[in-house]
Image: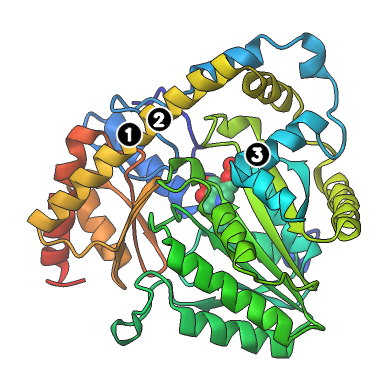
Amino acid sequence: MGEINVVDAPAQVMASEKEMLFLSDHAVSKKGNDTIFGCYARYLQAAESGADAVNGTVGALLTDSGRLAVNTIVIDEIRNADEMEFASYAPLKGIPAFLDLSKSLALGGSREQLESLGIHMTSIATPGGSGSLHIAAKCFANPGEKVLLRDRHWGPYTGFLDGCGLKMETYPLLPSQDHDDFPFFDHLSFEQAVVKLANEQHHVMTWLNDPAHNPTGLSLPSESRIELLNIFMRQAVNHSKVGFTLLIDSAYHFYAQETHGWANTIVEALQSGMMWPENLVICFALSISKSHTIYGMRNGALICLHPEEEIVSRLHDVFGVTGRQAWSASPRVSQHALCNLHADAQKSLVWRESLDEFHALLHERRESFLQACQQYHVPINPTHDGFFAWLETDRASEIVEACASKHVYLVPLDGGVRIGLCAIPTHHIERVAKVISEAIFETKGSV
Ligand SMILES: Cc1ncc(COP(=O)(O)O)c(C=O)c1O
């Protein structure tokens, strides 16, 4: 299965631990290779040596034959672009039509409602959702401050924060059983952490990868979303001299049942009379990688909402300068192609149909995985949407090794095992659950 190359081969382990005087202190702290890429390389090696190996490692949607799923109309639209679209720079902040489109992709039908409720919004084009996270890290916290995350989160968050001199504070992904008023949101720990940070720093920023959380596939239901928003707004009012940023990382929202749940929740909150505090912004880190299957083109946007036009316009400049200082402009041809595609109702429909097929494939894999986990008594975490499922365990490496010995390749992360349903062919799903169950039993008997 060597034909797909969704990730690079692992870098050679550094030749030695020699002192390298030319590296900065910050650079010296950077070590090794991404765990996920390493696991994928092991899978590739096994497959190439003829083993009947299963790939549950990568974070890209693969078809049942192991090829990267591609939304063909997007690629056709890029191919059809004029050579100038390939060759020219994009405007530094992005092509205006793309910025407009990015707001609709992030907010869906709620965009107009938000605008009619007096919410202003700005967007800047970024190289992927990663670029949006970088801008947020640079602009919404001071070096040394902590950003609030759930304890289970996408690994690169730590690197984005570290690269900007930031630290993290975490709260549990799920509540303990005696505090389960919101079964998928630990509202007590969240509020405690928000208050603590608000008392200690000038900025409180939280990053929330929802819906379809990486690495668990968890999506917050609307009651949890409204509770989270209530808490954040309440604490912003209580700490009026502190800047509050709620960043929704919507890398996978097009693979969730409630694609625009967060925008709907904000509308609902405003319609029920919630006052938006002046010291609060809400941002969406939009990624085009998965929604349009152009991971390598590096497109995304940071969309920011606030009731005051002047504030939003100032943020537009701040973001633009920050992007300029990091990567200049974002890639142009794909911004151009997406605008053409979505300006044409027929093409847009073709994109949607293909997306729906991918979504259905993921849904089928998740359903059969959940069923098989039940059959083989695998205590899998709650999982609803997106690319992944998650086994919470403090023996992740042992379990992953035991699975690898049976040629099922998964990813050990802090606190658990990530199961890449996005990569596992549907006909192998049951085998994966069975092998995990055996691995749990062989290595100890319980997670
Ligand atoms: C949780 C999460 N956020 C953001 C991203 C950013 O993706 P990209 O930079 O490719 O748009 C990813 C990609 O895997 C992700 O998993």
Report how far apart the C-alphas of labels 2 and 3 lie in the structure: 18 Å
In this rendering, which labeled residue sits more in front, label 2 or label 3?
Answer: 3
Which residue does the numbered mark 3 point to in the structure image? 104
Residue 273 placement (x, y as % from top left) = 64, 70
Please name whichever residue, 47 or 153, is drawn nearer the observer in this view of the structure.
153
Residue drawn at 57 percent across, 60 percent down: 268
Residue drawn at 85 percent across, 21 percent down: 88
Please name whichever residue, 187 or 133, is drawn nearer the observer in this view of the structure.
187
Residue 301 placement (x, y as % from top left) = 70, 43
Residue drawn at 14 percent across, 58 percent down: 437
Which residue does the numbered mark 2 point to in the structure image? 356
Please name whichever residue, 99 or 126, is drawn nearer the observer in this view of the structure.
99
Which residue does the numbered mark 1 point to in the structure image? 360
CB of mark 1 within 8 Å of CB of mark 2? Answer: yes
Please name whichever residue, 385 or 377, is drawn nearer the observer in this view of the structure.
385
Q: Secondary structure at mark 2?
A: helix
**Crowd rating for badge 2 (residues with CA inside 10 Å; few <14, some 14–19, many 20+):** some
Q: Is residue 160 left or right of residue 69?
A: right
